[in-house]
């Protein structure tokens, strides 16, 4: 039973995922081109909740359409980009953001590139220095005498 | 006959147990006869898996619905090509393809490894045997493609329509040739750790495998990207989807491996690092297999409801990655460090390349796994999508791409950065010119777009500069130059081609990301619209019946602004009744390197049709560039040094070189 339910969910997901993508429909665009441009940019940062890893800008699901209209309504009402995002998150949770927030929980996510690049760089420099310092030590006087003797033979 | 396929798999599993143990024991105890078991057992294993695969394919061709796998993924009306490709268009079949390619590579080592020291070859084959054992057991216990149905259904449930495409015929086999090809590098690395011996000759044996796997993986990813571009209907070429990332991570790590193996071969430096990269690259391939095959990506919960497959692959993952890394930790200290070099040198440049590429790999890895980890730990759901990767991966690539042309111009051991910069002056001037030309002549080009074009031209001219300099362009007479050009080692052409291809791909990405134009509207038959200097007239919709689908084809006439006709573009919507699924077939017209892309949507209330048109400048360069990269890999593969195999020094080495032996 459970398995059948999983199949059903998968089939539904497949339908939504494969449906011809018709994101922004002709009637949706805002008359003000600058506002519309902001709406498009915001849409590409918001996730379509019922699709797999698709932004609402690319999805033709009903819910994505509702969200696109919602974004445009908020913009028309004079919200800033951040206010629109905050509003959508307050209604749908952080899952809706395709670009996770800079928060403590996401510190490792955002920090990885910088930490690795710097850490790796420092590591390489340290190894290179260590290598150079590890050059063969000078001969001790006993060894030098021995070498002299060998050479004189 | 179906049972013969199943039985062949069981036999192959039994043989892989032999392959995993006898040659290894032989290598450890210097028993020639036990070592010699490796070759015939490997070849027989390949033959058996091949037989199983052929039998499954025949079941698909004959639409034998008594086989559950065929019933679930095929239909008697499906075109023959998709019946055949459907064999690997599902979980069980694709795992069988995975193992088939694994045993194929094992056989290549067995056949072409004649110049390898017997003990190394035996150990490598044994490690290949371990991987084969694990995956054959996985197939036999959780994913049997030969499971039967009784009574046999009369008709099948058809293959997912978006997979019924030529792209699917090519994409998975190429991808797996790449993925699984890295298993050979992995086996060589583990064998070197078991032997405790690694030297320049080892790198020379590993390099062709890396090159081949890398070239295949490049092709596989590119093919998948182009398939998504034309089949999914919204014209994107890369979505940073976890499934894509799963194949991209081994590619990034493999690219790093390709470069560090050069240092190891030429200068016997970076041995330990190269070994680690070989292990990591294949580990990422395994991780990719786990991510795609376990269902964990859709949701951690989906994974929890039917975990048998996922847990099995997770165990394989832990045993192989954990085991090889533990072996690495124990044994790597016994390997001697190699040559010393100045920071500004070819080696130094390649180290920098590796730093950026591994950081990029880790960025993609963390971005892909973070939502899973957060959900597993706290139950909260977060998304990591394209905007994240654009912000992190992008900035990592820019400095790397800027530095690419310098690498091949620096000398080994100690290079002269200033001299290299002077030699690159022409390339630099050329890219500066490209930046200015873009700003001046391209409408609506942003500064960022112009700089992106400049970066691409820099890469392309940088690659050409390398060849020109090595041929003595401008400093020797033409005849000498021609002689030098023909005399240059193939690997130099390989490098230049790969870097040139990278430049072309970058140019394509920059073009489509920053200069694309879009036109969304509802059109009625007879209406026209304009985009990027072309006029498009909607002629109307024609219904068409295909073998296992119905289709409505929207026809458009394309013309220039001056009215010169450029023919028709057909964009259609299909409906597959068995699966009750619609698909889009985008209408695409290639003009120069750019494409006009038309996708159709629903009918409007007043008799119009929703149409979305994109002008995608230079978009084809994305995939042309990857073809050039593959060509570079292939040319490099045919370099004399690699073809002839081990250098004289290694043949003399049989009684083991003292300096390279572990304590």
Image: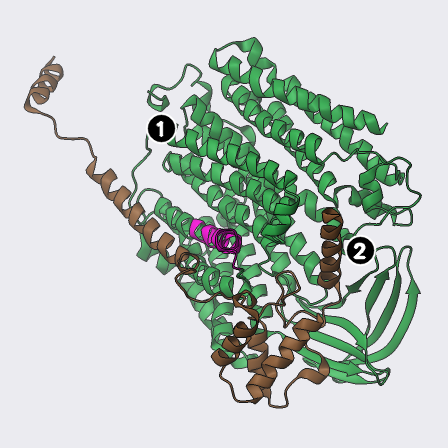
Place of residue B487 in the rendered image (x, y in percent of width and height, measured from the top left): 52, 41
Q: Which chain is green?
A: B
Q: Nearer the viewer, residue B87 or B151?
A: B151
Residue A116: in sight, yes or no? yes
Position of B81 with respect to B615 (left or right) is right
| Chain letter of disc 2 in the image | B
The residue range painted magenta reads B358-380
**Would you identify the image quadrant in which residue B141 lies?**
top right
| Residue B611 higher or lower than B334, as above or below | below
Between B609 and A150, the one lying in front of the other is B609
Q: Main secondary structure of the magenta part?
A: helix
Q: Which mark is residue A5?
A: none
Res. B615 in view:
no
B359 falls in the magenta region: yes
In front of the other: label 1 or label 2?
A: 2
Compare residues B225 and B285 and report the one nearer the observer: B285
The image position of residue B525, as x and y in percent, is 86, 82
Magenta stretch holds residue B254: no
- Residue at the extreme front: A1
The secondary structure type at the circle numbered 2 is helix
Which mark sits nearer the N-terminus, 1 or 2?
A: 2
| Residue B407 image offset from top left, x and y in percent | 41, 51
Dividing the picture into quarters, in which one does residue B135 lie? top right
Q: Which mark is residue B335?
A: 1
Q: Colour of chain A?
A: brown
Q: Please give the residue where the numbered disc 2 appears in the rendered image.
A: B161
């Amino acid at each position: 039973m459970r398995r059948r339910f999983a199949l059903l969910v998968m089939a539904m997901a497949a339908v939504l995922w494969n449906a011809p993508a018709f994101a922004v429909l002709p009637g949706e665009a805002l008359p003000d081109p600058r506002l519309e441009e902001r709406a498009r940019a915001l849409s590409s940062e918001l996730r379509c909740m019922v699709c797999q890893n698709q932004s609402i800008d690319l999805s033709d699901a009903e819910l994505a359409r509702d969200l696109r209209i919602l974004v445009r309504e908020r913009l028309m009402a004079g919200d800033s980009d951040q206010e629109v995002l905050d509003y959508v998150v307050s209604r749908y949770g952080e899952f809706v953001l395709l670009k996770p927030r800079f928060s403590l929980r996401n510190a490792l996510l955002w920090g990885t590139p910088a930490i690795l690049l710097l850490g790796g760089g420092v590591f390489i420099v340290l190894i290179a220095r260590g290598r150079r310092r590890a050059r063969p030590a000078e001969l001790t006087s006993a060894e030098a005498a021995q070498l002299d003797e060998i050479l004189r033979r | 006959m179906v049972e013969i396929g199943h039985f062949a798999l069981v036999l192959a599993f039994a043989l892989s147990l032999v392959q995993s143990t006898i040659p290894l024991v032989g290598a450890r105890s210097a028993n020639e006869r036990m070592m010699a078991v490796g070759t015939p057992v490997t070849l027989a294993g390949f033959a058996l898996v091949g037989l199983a695969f052929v039998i499954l394919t025949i079941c698909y061709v004959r639409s034998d619905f008594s086989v559950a796998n065929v019933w679930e993924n095929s239909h008697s009306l499906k075109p023959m090509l998709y019946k055949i490709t459907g064999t690997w268009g599902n979980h069980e079949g694709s795992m069988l393809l995975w193992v088939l390619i694994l045993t194929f590579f094992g056989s290549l080592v067995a056949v072409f490894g004649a110049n390898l020291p017997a003990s190394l070859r035996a150990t490598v084959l044994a490690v290949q045997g371990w991987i084969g054992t694990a995956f054959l057991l996985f197939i036999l216990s959780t994913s049997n493609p030969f499971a039967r149905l009784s009574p046999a259904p009369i008709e099948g449930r058809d293959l997912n329509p978006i997979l019924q495409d030529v792209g699917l015929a090519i994409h998975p086999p190429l991808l797996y040739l790449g993925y699984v090809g890295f298993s050979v590098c992995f086996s060589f690395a583990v064998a070197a750790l078991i032997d405790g011996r690694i030297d320049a000759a080892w790198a020379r044996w590993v390099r062709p495998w890396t090159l081949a796997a890398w070239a295949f993986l490049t092709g596989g990813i590119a093919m998948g990207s182009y398939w998504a571009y034309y089949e999914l209907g919204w014209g994107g070429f890369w979505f940073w989807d976890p499934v894509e990332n799963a194949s991209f991570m081994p590619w990034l790590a493999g690219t790093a491996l390709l470069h560090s193996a050069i240092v190891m071969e030429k200068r016997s430096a970076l041995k330990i690092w190269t070994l680690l990269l070989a292990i990591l690259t294949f580990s990422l391939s395994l991780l990719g297999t786990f991510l795609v095959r376990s269902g964990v990506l859709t949701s951690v919960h989906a994974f929890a409801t039917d975990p048998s497959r996922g847990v099995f692959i997770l165990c394989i993952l832990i045993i192989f990655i954990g085991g090889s890394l533990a072996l690495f930790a124990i044994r790597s200290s016994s390997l001697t460090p190699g040559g010393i070099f100045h920071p500004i040198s070819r080696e130094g440049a390649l180290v920098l390349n590796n730093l950026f590429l591994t950081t990029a790999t880790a960025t993609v890895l963390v971005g892909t796994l973070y939502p899973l980890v957060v959900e597993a730990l706290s139950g909260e759901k977060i998304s990591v999508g394209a905007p994240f990767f654009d912000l992190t991966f992008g900035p990592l690539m820019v400095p790397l791409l800027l530095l690419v042309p310098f690498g091949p111009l620096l000398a080994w051991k100690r290079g002269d950065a200033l001299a290299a910069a002077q030699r690159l002056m022409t390339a630099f001037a050329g890219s500066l010119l490209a930046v200015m030309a873009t700003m001046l002549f391209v409408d609506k080009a942003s500064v960022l777009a112009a700089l992106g074009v400049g970066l691409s031209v820099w890469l392309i001219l940088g690659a050409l500069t390398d060849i020109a300099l090595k041929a003595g362009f401008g400093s020797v007479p033409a005849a000498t130059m021609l002689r030098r050009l023909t005399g240059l080692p193939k690997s130099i052409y390989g490098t230049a081609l790969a870097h040139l291809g990278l430049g072309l791909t970058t140019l394509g990405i920059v073009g489509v990301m920053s200069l694309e134009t879009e036109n969304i509207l509802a059109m009625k038959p007879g209406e026209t619209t304009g985009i990027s200097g072309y006029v498009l007239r909607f002629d109307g919709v024609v219904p068409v019946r295909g073998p296992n689908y119905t289709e409505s084809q929207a026809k458009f006439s394309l013309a220039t602004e001056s009215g010169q006709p450029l023919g028709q573009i057909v964009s259609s919507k299909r409906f597959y009744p068995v699966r009750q699924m619609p698909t889009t077939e985008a209408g695409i017209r290639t003009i120069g390197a750019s494409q006009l892309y038309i996708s159709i949507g629903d009918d409007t209330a007043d008799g119009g049709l929703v149409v979305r048109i994109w002008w995608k400048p230079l978009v084809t360069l994305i995939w042309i560039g990857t073809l050039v990269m593959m060509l570079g890999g292939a040319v490099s593969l045919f370099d004399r040094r690699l073809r002839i195999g081990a250098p004289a020094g290694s043949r003399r080495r049989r009684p083991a070189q003292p300096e390279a032996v572990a304590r």
